[in-house]
Amino acid sequence: MPTRQMIKKAKPMGAAELNRRKLRSRRRFLKGAILGTLGFCIGAAVDALGIEPEWIEVVEQDLHLKGLPKDFTGRRLIQISDLHCSTTVTRKYLERCIRRVNHLKPDIVVLTGDYVTHDALGRFRERVTELLANLKAECGVYAVMGNHDYGIYSSWGQGGNGNVGVLINKLETAGVRVLRNAAEAVTIGEQRIWLVGLGDLWAKDVRPEIAFANVPDDEVRLLLAHNPDTVDHLNNYHYDLMLSGHTHGGQVNIPFFGPPILPVRNRRYHAGMFHITESKRLYVNRGLGRLGRVRFNCRPEITVFTLKAG
């Protein structure tokens, strides 16, 4: 127990000391902001800004689709992307993401790539597939692969298939249907819509002539492709909406300027909904994971699409 002599009364803070503390706090904030904006993946930048790179945002969208079968009206399709399971993006955080998705009670879940980061030694493939096995959706969980999933060369746009087959097999074993240049009908009763999945653009694995080969032109088609730049290679193919990830929304989004760095040729495809033509749309999900530790003004995203006719 402290004695009376040990107890000291707090001294009132003078105006000069108060100003000094405010100045130190302002300097610390500006230092963190500059480091975070430049993408330095250090704790000082994150802590100084008070940024939470794991502060999930649930984005709700009404998705109007011409010719949508009646039994699909009101159904929920949830998209998640870019988990980047790694030493930086922890299992605990990703478990929370999966629980959040299940809590939203999806009818369909689609995953748009980059489940690991590089992972040359295969340390995280097992971990991420164990996590994704816990997803629950009445009509199934479907996935396409991202550049990091193919291996280190493809992750930097240099092509090659690396260990993608190993990860695909693990996902399939976990109950995830992987659509690598393939299509599958999702059925409710006797009605259906189509999910069409493409390989990754940077891995030079995009084969739309195979993926669309047996899909009727007059039925609803939702296209999954990791890299949004893929949309510029599909002028001769019909789809209602393409779902992508890859950009992380830029990860750092500077007010009045936007993301300073984006891994796409067409910089407008950074995040959100885009009208490609009168009948084609593109949605770019900001992803749940990240490269490094920093997100600034760009929260991780779970997208909930409510399907509606028209």
Image: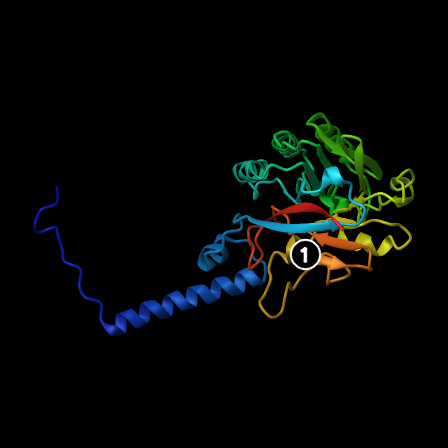
Colour scheme employed for the rendering of this structure: rainbow
Query: How far from the left and from the top, in percent, is residue 130?
Result: 62, 29
Can you tell which quarter of the image residue 109 is in? top right
- Whether residue 125 sits left or right of residue 164 in the image: it is left
The residue at the point 19 percent across, 66 percent down is: 12
Q: Judge by depth and name the residue closer to the eye, 166 or 215.
A: 215
Q: Residue furthest top?
A: 173
Between 281 and 43, the residue placed more toward the observer is: 281
Q: Is residue 70 left or right of residue 11?
A: right
- Relative height, residue 227 to residue 115 (above, below): below
Q: Is residue 5 above or below residue 129?
A: below
Helix, strand or loop at mark 1:
strand
Quadrant (top left, top right, bottom left, bottom right) of the N terminus: top left
Camera-nearest residue between 59 and 155 = 59
Looking at the image, residue 61 sits to the left or right of residue 52; the answer is right
Task: For residue 308, say whether it is visible.
Answer: yes
Residue position for label 1: 272
- Judge by depth and name the residue closer to the eye, 195 or 225: 195
Quick one: which residue is furthest to the bottom in this view? 16
Q: Residue furthest left?
A: 4
Q: Residue at x 88, y 42 (%)?
A: 212
x and y percent of residue 105 in the render? 60, 36
